[in-house]
Every structure is written in structure tokens, then in C-alpha cells.
Amino acid sequence: METISLLLVGTGGYAGVYVEELLHRTRAQQRFRLVGAVDPYAAQSSSGRELLDRGVPVYDTVEEFYREHRAQLACIVTPIYLHAKQAEYCMEHGSDVLCEKPICGSLPEAAAMMDARDRTGRRLAIGFQWSFSEGILKLKRDILDGKYGKIRRIRTLVYFPRNLDYYRRGTGWAGKRRLETGEWLLDSVASNAAAHYLHNMLFLTGERMDRSAEPATMEAEVYRANAIEMFDTCALRIHTGRGEELLFYATHAVPYEKRFDNCLECILEGEKGTVTIRSGKDQESMIGRLSDGKEIVYPNPGADNMRKLYCMAEAIEKDAPLFCVPETALPHLECICALADSFPQTPSFPKEWVRYVEKDRQYICEGLGETLQSCFQEGQLPGEIRRKGGAAWAENPHEISLKGPVREKEEGAGSTYEA
């Protein structure tokens, strides 16, 4: 079988996972031929230096690469504000594209990416890796087959502690709303590190294998312990167009010790059964329990986070279907844009609740993990808990409608929603 020529756009940060796979895994070497990389800062990361040491041609821009080479597949693993233009350019120069999540930073950019795909006839997939997972895809087929009946609610709680190094990495774009040059980022806990799990709830409630549910309304609270433009903590209640309730709690502002507990818990509640997903120290599981007593043990959703790469190979070689395309990822972006519109300024946790942990170089909110755990268990938001005497720092949720048509802002990017 002839190998697929591959361009890697980005070499540092998460792109290092791609470098490890492509250079050190036999299964990758049997399927792919790395013909080049793009990263003006390649020499600043260990993975970038390894590519240089191995003689892989590394260019500063995609334009420079395509002047000399062609690639059947381009993997975009760069900061959010670069996704759209780089993906468009790669498709226009003959490459199918696997673009890391989120799809991009604004709805007009997403539309431009889809236009480029349709115009060029290339494939475009978005790297929400759980939507390529064997376990999640099996679960979604079971949902569509009616095994769990109508889905009433999905709850997800994510503790992902992050410190100042996380926010100061790269060129300093983390946590920003947009760059000084105008490009949209909307980088937050919900759009980046924990984006997979917000998207996953929308994905599992989609009416087709390659579609996610459309959000109709959202009650939202966002906060920050860090000095960033966007938010490091959120609590969301989303109702889909078909009435499913999706509850999402995610934060970077809990102590690092939380990463050793259950850092991720997701419970799906259907008329005929439930599914529980848990991930923590040395454990990950996804188990369905039907009302007739039957138990279904699904493959762990994080068992192979690079399966997306091989799904792309199957699509290129055999025209196999891709289940996470721009249309699948768009509802997640709609939620992120709606949050940005509703919160032009992110509320800070009150100073008396914020503590700096010197040994971890991290800002945390005292008691936040316990509060979000209570919210998760009770199906409530912090502002609702406050009315009962808890979460004294919480504000009232913003009520957001996502039913109206999306239109561009006067500045030409971002989104607003008309009721």
C-alpha cells in the first residue's frame, strides 16, 4: 500500500503528539510519509528540533511549502487564529485537511473554511478526537438505534488545572478574546482544553452520525481567577432544539491535586438507560446500564487519541466517511461565540476567594471544585446554588437565545444572535 504524503502545520505544543506518532510509531510509518512541516518557531520546541535533526523540510509558512511540494494530507496543529486561513490555503493547493479543534475563532471564518472545501472538493475534518473514538462512535450508534430511548440530559464535569505557564506559552495568545491585529481567538476553558467534552455532548445528541445537536438556548456563568480576557471557569445549561438538557462545568482554577481525582465525569440519562464516563488517575471507563439490567462496557474514549489520523487515511484511501466535519463542529463554535457576545467582559472571582499557589504557579478559587461537584450532582448552576446559601461568589446566569439567524458583526468577525 502506497503511503500518504503528509504536511504537518505546527511542530510545538500539541503538535508534538503528531511528531511522536509520525516518527516513532510503526503504524504511522506504514501509512504516512512526512514530506514537510511548517513552523517559524520550530527550533524552540523539542519536537520541532527533532524534525530539523532528521532532515524534514521545515518552512515558515504554508505558502513556502507549497511552492516546492505537494501533500495529500495537511494536519493543522497551530493556534486557533491560524486555523481558517491555513486550512483554506492547504485545500486550495490540493490537500485534504485534518484541522485540530476548535474549528476556528469565528463563525464567518468557519463559513469560509466550508466554502473552500466545497469549492475545491477536498475533505476537511475537525480533530475533536472523541468523535473519532471507537467507543464514542459505538455509543452514538446505540443512541441513534434507540437503545437508550430519548436522551433527557447529559452532565459533564471537567477539572483541568492550569497554571501561569499554560497562559504564557507560545506567543502569548492563550486566554485572549482576539489579537491586537484583529484575529478572533475566543480562547477559554470551553473552547480549548475542555472543548472536547462540551462538543461531545452536542455530538452524542446529534440526529446523524456526522452531525451535532443545535443549541437553542443557554443559561451561562463564566468566571476568571487568572488575569485573562476570556474565562478559565464556566457553568452552562444548554437546551438543544429537540429539548435535551446539556450541563457543562469546566475549570482551570482548581488545585493541581484535582488532576489525581476524577478529572472528568460525564453522565448521560436516557429513558431506557444511562451511560457513565469517568477519567482520572490510572483509570478511564465508559459503561452503559440499560433499564432491563443489561450492562454495556464500551471501549475507553481516550484509548487512541490519534485514531483521527487513521480515519483520515481511510477517507483518503477508501473514501470512508468522516464523522467530525465542519458542520459537526459548528454547534460548539456557536456556543463559544454566544458566550463571547453575552460576556463582553468576563467577571472575576472576588479577590477574597482567589489564592495564588506559589509551588504550582497557579491561581485558584477556594472551594470551587466542591461547588462545581455539588452543581453537577444537583443539576444546577452556581448562581442557583447561591440562592440556597452556597457559592457566595456566584452571579446570576445569563440567559442566551441561539435560535435566531447568525449575522456578522460590523467589524466583520465574531457573531451575534438575533432573537
Image (cartoon, helix red, strand yellow):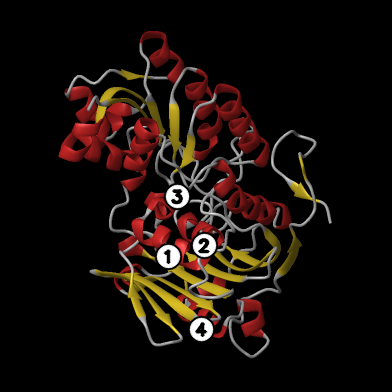
- Residue, disc 2: 204
The residue under the point 64% across, 33% down is 182
Give the mark nearer the N terminus: 1 vs 3.
3
* Residue 238 x/y as whole percent: 64, 67
The label shown at residue 377 is 4
Q: Is residue 7 above or below residue 99?
A: above
Question: Where is residue 373 shown, x and y percent of the image?
Answer: 48, 80
Q: Kindly indicate whether the residue at mark 1 contacts the one at mark 2 (C-beta within 8 angstroms).
A: yes
Residue 75 in view: yes
Q: Earlier in the sequence, mark 2 or mark 3?
A: 3
Q: Amino acid at mark 4?
A: Gln
**Label 2: element kind:** helix
Tag 1 secondary structure:
helix
- Label 1 vs 4, first from the N-terminus: 1
Q: Quadrant of residue 99?
A: top left
- Cα–Cα span, label 2 and label 3: 13 Å
Measure how far apart labels 4 and 3 are at the Cα level: 26 Å
Counting residues from the start of the chain, the first of labels 2 and 4 encountered is 2
Image depth: mark 1 or mark 3 in front? 1
Q: Which residue is mark 3?
A: 128
- Asked if the residues shown at circle 2 and circle 4 are in contact, with their CB atoms under 8 angstroms apart, the answer is no
Q: Nearer the viewer, mark 2 or mark 4?
A: 2
Q: Secondary structure at mark 3?
A: loop
First reached walking from the N terminus: tag 4 or tag 3:
3
